[in-house]
Image (cartoon, rainbow, N blue to C red):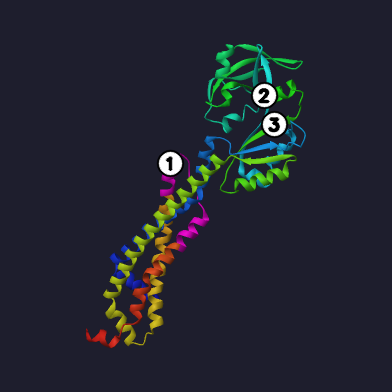
Amino acid sequence: MWWRIISRSFRNRKARLALSILSVVLGASLVAALSNLSLEIPAKAGSQLRAYGANLLILPQVPPGTNEAYISENDLSFLERGEVAQAVTSYAPSLYSLVEIAGQPIVMVGTWLDVMPQISPWWQITGYWPEGRENMAEALVGTQVSEKLGLGLGKEFTVSSGDNTRRFKVAGVVTTGAAEDKQVLVSLKAVQELTVLPGKVGLVQVSALTQSHPLAHLAKLIEEGIPGSEGRVLGQIAKAESRILSKVQLLLALVAGLILTASGLVILSTMTTTLLERTAEIGLMKALGASSQRIAGLFSAEIGIITLGGGILGYLLGYILAQFIGYRVFASAISPHPLAFLVTITIAAMVTWFSSILPLRRATQIDPAITLRGD
């Protein structure tokens, strides 16, 4: 009989039922979209911010009384293992040396040229990137060095460092607006051989995500894992990333709050109207012996069905909306998250039940004698 009453209530009030479910669907869909986006945005926004360069440097600890110190290149494999590997997206070791080119002192940088496009994607290259991590024959020349020494594309030049010399061919001219414009960049191995420092690096640029591991914590892990190293957070980039992500998440939370408030008001209005329409029905059930708890249970079951149906439909629509936003803003798909589904159903239930407290309370306080008299 209990389920017959509920099913008949739904059949006789299809318009009210549709409006109630639509209210839940509206709120749930936007909560689902915002939940999925909130779980994906930090990673996607972080990857977008990585275009501004490395946000962490690894430097060698310089012992007292010495001027130079280096990190072992072999120890850098630590960045590709365990907890650190989950945060580090790319890294590039570098070794700096002052060399002579055509009798002029020039800073030469040895690095992994195949990784630098990921670390510094804003670099402008006229020509092409040298291929191969251990390319010993080609170099990138800073735009100021190119103009000063007349090193255009395809030109060959000789580099001297102490008693060692090596010839390179200009593969590209690099423009960054920074120190690289005054430098010559070659493979790390080439500089290690010229300076007789095999397997040594002077610093490591690291591009890391910040939503899973704070950079300060990541720097500490690196210091513990790489002997003789010191991790330094590049404050401006890290702070900018943190501020942007915080503002995005705050915006999502504010929008979600406003939407849920509007949905709650619609549900409250709908449930109150439904109660007024069913006052005589409630009075009759009470006159026949139905307790206030039974009346509340009956309405609660209807609310639960509306919440579950509206929540599931809302999640599906919200996921579609999240995909649309993901493709429009980040040009990539938004992955479905079980947590987002649980959050959507939970919040939809909380808003619906909270909005229904007043109508349920009024339903349990109806006096059957007054109702049946028509007063």
Secondary structure type for disc 2? strand
Q: Are marks 3 and 2 in contact (CB under 8 Å)?
A: no
Secondary structure type for disc 3? loop
Badge 2 local density, few (<14 within 10 Å), some, or many (20+)? many
Distance, label 1 to label 2, CA atoms, is 37 Å
The residue that label 1 is drawn on is: 329
Residue stretch rendered in magenta on the structure: 321-346
Label 1 vs label 2, nearer the camera: 2
Q: Are marks 1 and 3 in contact (CB under 8 Å)?
A: no
Q: Residue at x 57, y 43 (%)?
A: 209
- Residue 226 shown left or right of residue 284 in the figure: right
Please check the rendered image and state whether residue 345 is part of the magenta-colored stretch, yes or no: yes
- Extreme left residue here? 374
Q: Tell which circle, 1 or 3, labels the residue nearer the N-terminal end.
A: 3
Q: Tell which circle, 3 or 2, labels the residue nearer the N-terminal end.
A: 2
In this rendering, the answer to whether 6 lies above or below 318 is below
Q: What amino acid is labelled 1 in the image? A: Val
Please check the rendered image and state whether residue 137 is part of the magenta-colored stretch, yes or no: no
Q: What amino acid is labelled 3 in the image? A: Gly
256 and 147: which one is in front?
A: 147
Residue 87 in sight here: yes
Residue 148 position within the rendered picture, expressed as x and y whole percent measured from the top left: 57, 14
Residue 361 position within the rendered picture, expressed as x and y whole percent measured from the top left: 36, 78
Secondary structure type for disc 1? helix
The residue that label 2 is drawn on is: 187
Q: What amino acid is labelled 2 in the image? A: Ser
The residue that label 3 is drawn on is: 202
325 and 311: which one is in front?
A: 325
Label 1 vs label 3, nearer the camera: 3
- Residue 116 shown left or right of residue 5 in the figure: right
